[in-house]
Image (cartoon, coloured by chain):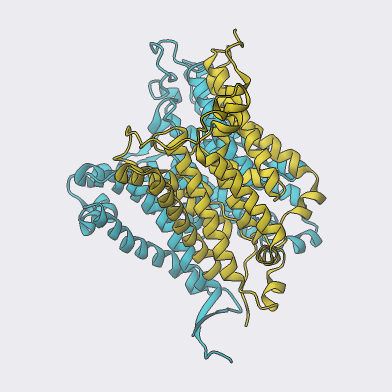
């Protein structure tokens, strides 16, 4: 019969092959899903993975959205991956994203309509701080009271969503907005607009920050003692303790970093694509970034590729809505499927399939 | 402000209604965790149950068929989780999250043609004379059948875990899977059964929401109920009786803040809507603070991967 046998060492080739395999399986089963919805599966898969690059009419617009969508996913996922490696499960990045946008946005509105290139950096710092502090709540509750960070950080997403609703109908509401539940437009004033650096690929300043963070995260995880301690804590908490690593410090640092990065992503979204705070501001990047982190093997450079791939599914998903009338929710099923398949085929990294005679 | 419109009896009755979906999901998850498996996909299974139950009820005109369909849908989704974590040995935290993300997407996809519809009415357990009694009537005899069923299930789970041999085996698997395996128990099969049971009850909890409590289908209608159910298992220290307490406490907070909103209290409704989630956090903190007790109550093999070497 077929049996799984543990490998002595995790297979390196498998670590690279399994994400590709997962994407292929998702295409296959996603195609079946599309067929079940009455959509031509080949056409749909082509629209998602091929047309954003090469379609004569949609291609150019799609490309200009690629990094706009990949940027926040990469920024959040890199932060999450650091925590996941330490066994610290921050599931509430969506909440930290919202709180970052609110605190950065509040600073921008307080200064309105000040001009100057210092406004945006100041807002970014405020946003990082907002996300950081929001992530410190689960961190402190875990350190002091042993409360599960998964549940606390997730509950705080719902709190943040309600807080956003209170802000856009209260202190941060546009005084000239005829009572609509939304803030002033940030993209209406130059000093609070995120500069677009390369339009054809949608590379705004936030994307550059994301790439810098990717490199910094790689250096920290692979070349710095802290990175080693984080990985050690994740792989063997007891060994880490004997090596003098303080678990509380690791929890605070990893949650803090991921919170600050999610907060910054929130501000870049606010001062770029979103433009203003409304109750529809959160679009689920904080949750999709979890898929991105795993698909990228919790490795910063892998996350860049995974982020771009996930951005493609967003863009392609919009294309299939427009041209084939496919429902918007189909794409989140597609994304969830991808994570399922990745987790399923991941077994081959640590185990090999062997044929064994039954021992009686 | 006028508080006189708040009738204590009416509040208690609606509190029980608000608590029941979470009670069902939490008692299911309790059995799963007692077998040593942490399934974070409760939210996903609940919402799939909500749409499956709603759609099948609308199509067949029978609430009962809908409820059964919801349980089946929850169990099927749970078995995907079970296959990945028990056979393919994937990380339980990540797989549970995947289940939630996938379930939310799939439910939205399945439900897009069902928004704004009304489900068939569900039968109530109205006992002619008893339900008309002044206070005791509505409190004890005026509920829908699911509420009695949910309490019955909690009792059945308590009895199963503490008074039957099968329950003892399930707990043994959760406490030390290697020891249970060496005694000849099939760890994977027992856990798969527990996972399916948890999924069925989460699905049923979701269907209660869309068929009886709301009753309507809206996208994302579970709004974190599955996660709160997970927190309530911790709050209950993995004891069935205390799950009732936790769920009803949560139901009380929900109903109270809804009533305060309706009264037009001078706090922004958004702040009131936060309170159930904040209370969940506070409760979680209180119950986890005593590390020794928390680690004594939690099943020792919770979330650990089991791989039989021979």
Q: Residue at x 51, y 69 (%)?
A: B88
Q: In this orientation, which residue lies closer to the viewer: A191 or A296?
A: A296
Badge count:
0
Which image quadrant for residue A201? top left
The correct choice, above or below, for A170 with respect to A12 in the image is: above
Nearest the viewer among A189 and B167 is B167
**Nearest to the observer: residue A347 or residue A235:** A347
Q: Is residue A220 left or right of residue B126?
A: right
Q: Position of residue A349 (x, y in %)?
A: 52, 72
Residue A126 sits in which quadrant? top right
Q: Position of residue A135 (x, y in %)?
A: 63, 39
Q: Nearer the viewer, residue A233 or A327?
A: A327
- Above or below for A120 versus A145: above
- Residue drawn at x 48%, y 17% is A169
- Chain A palette colour: cyan
For the C terminus of chain A, the quadrant is bottom right
Does residue A99 appear in the picture of this structure?
no
- Return the x and y of residue B135 as percentages of the image width and height: 62, 23
Compared to residue A2, the image places residue A136 above or below, namely: above
Question: Does residue B119 appear in the picture of this structure?
Answer: yes
* Residue B186 relative to residue B98: left or right: right
**What is the letter of the yellow chain?**
B
Q: Extreme top residue here? A: B1
Residue B3 pos. (x, y %): 61, 11
Please tell me whether residue B157 is drawn above or below residue A271 in the rendered image: below
């Amino acid at each position: 019969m077929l049996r799984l046998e543990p490998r002595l060492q995790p297979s390196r080739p498998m670590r690279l092959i399994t994400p590709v395999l997962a994407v292929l399986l998702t295409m296959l089963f996603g195609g079946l899903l599309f067929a079940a919805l009455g959509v031509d599966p080949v056409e749909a898969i082509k629209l998602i993975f091929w047309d954003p690059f090469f379609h004569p009419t949609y291609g150019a617009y799609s490309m200009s959205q690629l990094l706009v969508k990949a940027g926040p996913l990469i920024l959040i996922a890199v932060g999450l991956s650091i925590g996941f490696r330490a066994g610290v499960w921050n599931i509430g990045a969506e909440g930290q994203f919202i709180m970052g946008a609110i605190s950065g946005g509040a600073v921008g509105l307080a200064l309105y309509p000040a001009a100057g290139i210092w406004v945006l950096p100041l807002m970014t710092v405020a946003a990082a701080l907002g996300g950081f502090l929001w992530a410190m709540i689960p961190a402190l509750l875990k350190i002091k009271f042993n409360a599960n960070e998964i549940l606390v950080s997730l509950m705080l997403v719902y709190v943040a969503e309600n807080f956003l609703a209170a802000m856009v109908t209260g202190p941060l509401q546009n005084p000239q907005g005829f009572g609509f539940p939304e803030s002033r437009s940030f993209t209406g004033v130059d000093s609070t607009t995120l500069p677009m650096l390369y339009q054809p690929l949608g590379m705004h300043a936030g994307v550059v920050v994301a790439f810098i963070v990717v490199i910094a995260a790689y250096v920290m995880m692979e070349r710095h003692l802290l990175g080693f301690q984080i990985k050690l804590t994740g792989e063997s908490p007891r060994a880490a303790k004997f090596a003098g690593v303080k678990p509380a410090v690791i929890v605070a640092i990893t949650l803090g970093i991921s919170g600050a990065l999610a907060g910054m992503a929130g501000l870049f979204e606010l001062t770029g694509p979103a433009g203003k705070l409304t109750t529809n501001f959160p679009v689920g990047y904080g949750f999709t970034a979890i898929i991105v982190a795993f698909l990228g093997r919790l490795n910063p450079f892998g996350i860049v590729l995974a982020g771009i791939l996930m951005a493609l599914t967003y863009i392609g998903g919009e294309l299939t809505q427009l041209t084939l009338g496919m429902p918007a929710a189909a794409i989140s099923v597609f994304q969830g499927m991808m994570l399922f398949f990745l987790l399923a085929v991941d077994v081959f990294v640590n185990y090999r399939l062997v044929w064994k005679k039954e021992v009686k | 402000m006028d508080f006189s419109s708040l009738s204590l009896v009416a509040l208690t009755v609606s509190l029980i209604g608000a608590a029941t979906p979470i009670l069902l999901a939490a008692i299911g998850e309790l059995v799963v965790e007692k077998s040593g498996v942490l399934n974070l996909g409760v939210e996903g299974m609940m919402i799939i149950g909500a749409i499956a139950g709603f759609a099948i009820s609308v199509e067949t005109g029978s609430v009962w068929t809908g409820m059964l369909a919801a349980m089946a849908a929850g169990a099927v989704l749970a078995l995907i989780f079970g296959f990945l974590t028990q056979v393919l040995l994937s990380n339980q935290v990540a797989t549970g999250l995947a289940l939630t993300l996938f379930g939310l997407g799939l439910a939205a996809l399945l439900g897009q043609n069902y928004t704004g519809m009304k489900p068939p009415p569900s039968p109530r357990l109205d006992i002619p004379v008893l339900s008309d009694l002044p206070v005791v009537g509505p409190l004890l005899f005026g509920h829908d059948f699911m509420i009695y069923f949910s309490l019955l299930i909690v009792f059945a789970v308590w009895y199963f875990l503490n008074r039957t041999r099968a329950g003892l085996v399930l707990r043994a698997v959760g406490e030390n899977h290697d020891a249970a395996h060496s005694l000849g128990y099939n760890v994977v099969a027992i856990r798969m059964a527990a996972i399916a049971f948890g999924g069925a009850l989460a699905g049923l909890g979701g269907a209660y929401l869309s068929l009886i409590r709301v009753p309507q289908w809206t996208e994302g209608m579970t709004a974190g109920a599955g996660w709160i159910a997970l927190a309530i298992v911790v709050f209950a220290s993995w004891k069935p009786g205390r799950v009732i307490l936790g769920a009803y406490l949560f139901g009380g907070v929900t109903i109270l803040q809804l009533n305060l909103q309706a009264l037009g209290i001078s706090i922004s409704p958004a702040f009131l809507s936060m309170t159930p989630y904040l209370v969940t956090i506070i409760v979680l903190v209180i119950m986890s603070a005593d590390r020794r007790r928390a680690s004594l109550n939690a099943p020792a093999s919770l979330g650990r991967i089991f791989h039989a070497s021979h």
